[in-house]
Image (cartoon, rainbow, N blue to C red):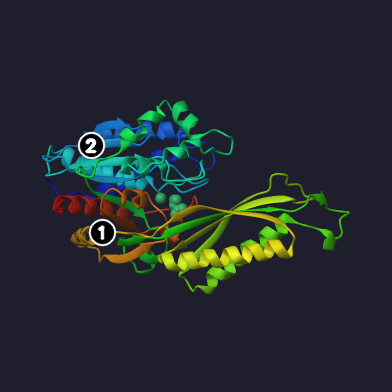
Amino acid sequence: MSDPDAMALGERADTMIRTLGSISAEPNRLIRQFLTPEHRAAADLVAKWMRAAKLDVSEDALGTVHGHWAGTGKKRLLIGSHIDTVIDGGMFDGPFGVVAGILAAEHFASAGRKLGFGIAVLAFGDEEGVRFPATLASSMACAGTFDATRLDMADKDGVTLRDAVVQYGKNPDDIAAAAYTRDVAAAYVEVHIEQGPVLEYKSQPLGVVTAIAGQSYLNVEFLGEAGHAGTVPMMLRRDALAGSAEVILLAEKLARETKGEVVATVGQLRIPAAASNVIPGNVALIVDIRSGSDAARQQFVDQLKTEIRAVASRRELGLTITQTRDVATTPCDSVLQDGIANAIRAVGGEPLHLASGAGHDGTAMARLCPIAMMFVRCRGGISHNPAEYASPADMGLAVAALIRFIETAKL
Ligand code: HGY
Ligand code: MN
Ligand code: MN
């Protein structure tokens, strides 16, 4: 078998990612949400690539596309990532992990080379969690941990996950069949852009992920009193948006005080009756809280909840706080980390070990089997932004390293 040509692999990856990146709900920005026509089109394209790579292709009831190259034993190395995007996102976040898996599997399949284990490439459709309130549904289904009560969750148009599955042409009763069994799933590996500035700062193309940060989501809703912007004196107002603004600045201030241990973001604000001449009576926001330390994250959540209650009391606002996410930090398997590190060395890199502040499908897959992640440098650390970019050279090195990892893996 020939040694992988990293540059050629990188060019192919770039072309595939740009083709996939052209599939969007809107012409001028990238939006590809779970179980939408754009997801369907992207899944069909990925399936076509998998078949061209000589993989056996199937699709489960939550839309995950599976491309399988059989080995001599029943165990499989799962390699995957997601093909859904945030709103106005970048085209590399997710798709590169799927493309890398297809190109790596193709390296063996096209040579007819059977390994001691099979390779299953997975294209998940719900990692960003933009359409429905919760996330990771498709990887949870593959991990066998999908909670069927989530089928009643609705998107902003009131479409439940159950209805969306049926509209996508699947049967919700078949979701459980998506699960891999522990005796088959030997390990899960995900290749992903770093989405941060560290690799670029250290002038390294590739990195080894040590853990995926834990996440807490606080859905906060203030209930004040809508009123005329011109007639209500300032001291008589119960302004739900002013209260929300205090919370946004509080989250930022408290996170800064942790000196990097915790990050907090409010990226979504809902003002149902927004108008410039109306005092906002009802406002909802989501606080996204991340940390590599579960204790620090919990302490931050408790502190922020106390402060939010004080804002509501001071401003005489009604308040509901619902915690919609509480995901523990997910460690990557140390033996797999060593395998990734050795593979990075084999392609000329110096493996930098770093934690992931971003969430990934690996968090769900870690409930099934040991996981590992390989990071690829991205320009300026920019992500969740159309300026997101990874070079063909770095992507080619990542695919070559993934191939090397597969060749040397003891599963
Ligand atoms: O939010 C995250 O970290 C991931 O991009 N969904
Ligand atoms: Mn991602
Ligand atoms: Mn993302």
x and y percentages locating residue 81 in the rendered image: 35, 46
* Label drawn at residue 68: 2
Residue at (74, 53) in percent of width and height: 224
Nearest to the eye among marks 1 and 2: give it. Answer: 1
Q: Is residue 37 visible?
A: no
Residue at (49, 74) in percent of width and height: 259
Separation of residues labelled 1 and 2 (CA atoms): 23 Å
In the image, residue 174 sits, relative to residue 115, either above or below, namely above
Q: Is residue 301 visible?
A: yes
Callouts 1 and 2 close, C-beta under 8 Å: no
Q: Secondary structure at mark 1?
A: loop
Q: Secondary structure at mark 2?
A: strand
x and y percentages locating residue 126 in the rendered image: 43, 42
Type of amino acid at the residue the image marks with label 2: His
In the image, residue 68 sits, relative to residue 314, either above or below, namely above
Which one is earlier in the sequence, the residue at label 1 or at label 2? Answer: 2
Which residue bears the numbered disc 1?
Answer: 333
